[in-house]
Image (cartoon, rainbow, N blue to C red):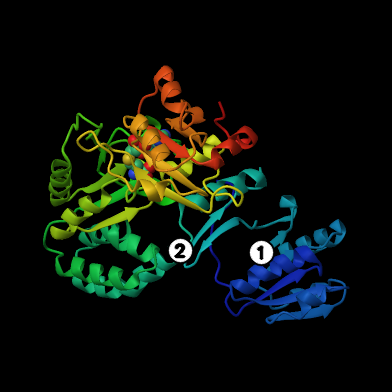
Amino acid sequence: MDFLPIFMNVKGRLCLVVGGGEVAKRKAGVLLEAGAKVRVVAPEIDSSLSEQAGVMSIVACFDVQHLEGVMLVIAATNDRSVNEQVSRLAHECNIPVNVVDDPELCSFIMPAIMDRSPLMVAFSSGGASPVLTRMMRGKLESLIPQNFSRLAAFAERFREQVKQRVTNPAKRRIFWENALDGVVAEKVLTGDETSAESMLQQMLADEDNIVRGEVYLVGAGPGDPDLLTFRALRLMQKADVVVYDNLVSKPIVDMTRRDAERIYVGKKRADHTLRQEEINALLVRLAHEGKRVLRLKGGDPFIFGRGGEEIETLAAENIPFQVVPGITAASGVASYAGIPLTHRDYAQSCMFVTGHLKDGTMNLDWDALARPRQTVVVYMGLQGLDTLCAKLIEHGMLDATPIAIVQQGTTQNQRVVTGTLSTLPGIAALEKLHAPTLIIIGGVVTLREKLQWFHPHHD
Ligand code: SAH
């Protein structure tokens, strides 16, 4: 360790900044934020700095007398000899000194910070590589939600109460771990402190009972792991058990917590591995065992995902759950295939329908689908493609209407096949497409010619 990391209390204390320009202003800003009184000394001081509340400026060249009564010093001038003088005198007086961008002259360095006050993370490479330090901060910034501050404030609010109720320190630590890493935390992070508080009170009341499980119903997007949300990723790394089906791509399943149990409940059109009722029952059973259950679904759980049915059962059983939206196939696939779903010249609206055949027929509102100037996206439509095209033509759609089928969209294996309502069924048969495929119908499909090259997986 090259430096001792400490957080210093400067509230109401006098700190000195030598320099009157941009850099000095930035440093003074940090000191002010930490509650310090700031003396600024320089022959010329920018008015935006001198006029700040809490700043006392002295227009003069730096002199040893300016160190009087000061608890720490930052030298931020562009004159090395002045910086050296500040450093030397401060060292002589035993006042901690930082010289901006000059580690040799410093007795302390200022870290990069991630501020989730009262939670604060400081980063330093000891001057070895500021860029690396900033990269590290960037990584953590994306991992730790912005409103983590709220969580810390929330914990502080109940600290005393919990301390009195849960007197055993080891138990108290576990209590807080469960609260701050579970459904209470999620509620706080999404801004619903009222529910969070009642859950916390419930946990306190139940303290002597067993831990309660919970379920995260998470949309994993259409395939490319880059399309996961931060929240999905966070919950994926927290779950004790993962229940997923075949729409969730392997790279995504691999991103769930390493030691989590994984249960495949693949659903293919005909050979349902587990029936929906069995999946519902499985989720309930696992949650009752006290586990954090991740129900990972392709796309968005509330779009042709039967997510509604799964949470109905959970609600009926009083199991806490949350739903995390995902990028639905229509949105992800269209974008990676270079097909905007709406466009002022082609389509003012967009419909998502399922082409899933029931008893060999497709029960859709054909007149509504055949209307001009709209895009129709068909999920689960490959089996019924012939019927789909024939019906649309029968209900007045032009047989030259462009149509695209995208197989395994957004993944490395994405394939796009295009044609018209009259030609596509034949083309699709020749191409031997297989699920999952998404069908997009409408004038917007022609835009693909122009736009596909800008997308990562063009083919
Ligand atoms: N909840 C999911 C849809 C589930 S229904 C969502 O919001 O996306 C399953 C259908 O979604 C598939 O039959 C297919 O039509 C479509 N689908 C899902 N992922 C896809 C992908 N990567 N490429 C093409 N179609 C996809």
Which sits in the foreground, 35 or 179? 179
Figure quadrant of residue 455: top right
Give the residue at mark 2.
147
Left or right: residue 145 versus residue 291 is: right
Which sits in the foreground, 240 or 392? 392
Mark 2 and mark 1 lie on one chain; the one further toward the N terminus is 1
Circle 2 packing at 10 Å, graded few (<14), some (14-19), many (20+), is some
Give the residue at mark 1.
96
Q: Nearer the viewer, mark 2 or mark 1?
A: 2
Figure quadrant of residue 339: top right
Which sits in the foreground, 374 or 431? 374
Q: Residue 331 carries which label?
A: none
Q: Is residue 272 visible?
A: yes
Amino acid type shown at disc 2? Asn
Q: Do the residues labelled 2 and 1 touch (CB within 8 Å)?
A: no
Left or right: residue 126 versus residue 430 is: right
Left or right: residue 396 versus residue 208 is: right
Can you say which quadrant of the picture contains the C terminus?
A: top right
Which sits in the foreground, 307 or 196? 307
| Horizontal and vertical percent position of residue 299 | 38, 43
* 133 relative to 452, above or below: below
Rounded to the nearest whole Å, what is the CA distance between mark 2 and mark 1? 33 Å
Ligand 1: quadrant of the figure: top left
Amino acid type shown at disc 1? Pro
Q: Is residue 166 visible?
A: no
